[in-house]
Amino acid sequence: MAVPKRKMSRANTRARRAQWKAARVALVPCPQCRAPRRPHVACSNCGTYNRRQVIEPSA
């Protein structure tokens, strides 16, 4: 089992953590109303998914 020989310094630890970035939320236009929505999720504006009405529109 690999065990570190020396304690990792604060600077090195923080430099490594600096690469952990949050990814942007992917948005695609809804084919019905062209409002931005997340992929594979029903549109909150018009309530459609896969060109079918699945939920009541929020507005």
Image: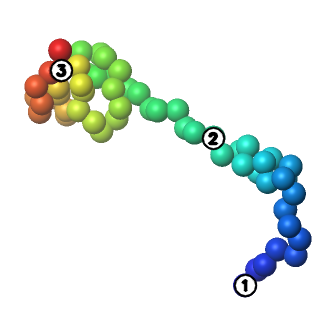
Residue 32 or residue 57, whichever sits in front = 57
Figure check: 36 above or below 24: above
The residue positioned 33% from the left and 26% from the top of the image is: 37
Q: Quadrant of the N terminus?
A: bottom right
Q: Residues within 10 Å of mark 2 (few under 14, many from 20)?
A: few
The residue positioned 24% from the left and 27% from the top of the image is: 43
The residue positioned 31% from the left and 17% from the top of the image is: 35
Check the image and tell me how it is coloured.
rainbow
Q: Residues within 10 Å of mark 1 (few under 14, many from 20)?
A: few
Q: Which mark is residue 58?
A: 3
Figure check: 52 above or below 12: above
| 48 relative position to 8: left or right | left
Q: Which mark is residue 21?
A: 2
Secondary structure under the numbered disc 2 in the rendered image? loop
Q: Which mark is residue 1?
A: 1
| 40 relative position to 8: left or right | left
| 58 relative position to 34: left or right | left
Do residues under tags 1 and 3 come within 8 Å of each other at their CB atoms? no
Q: Earlier in the sequence, mark 2 or mark 3?
A: 2
Give amino acid for label 1.
Met
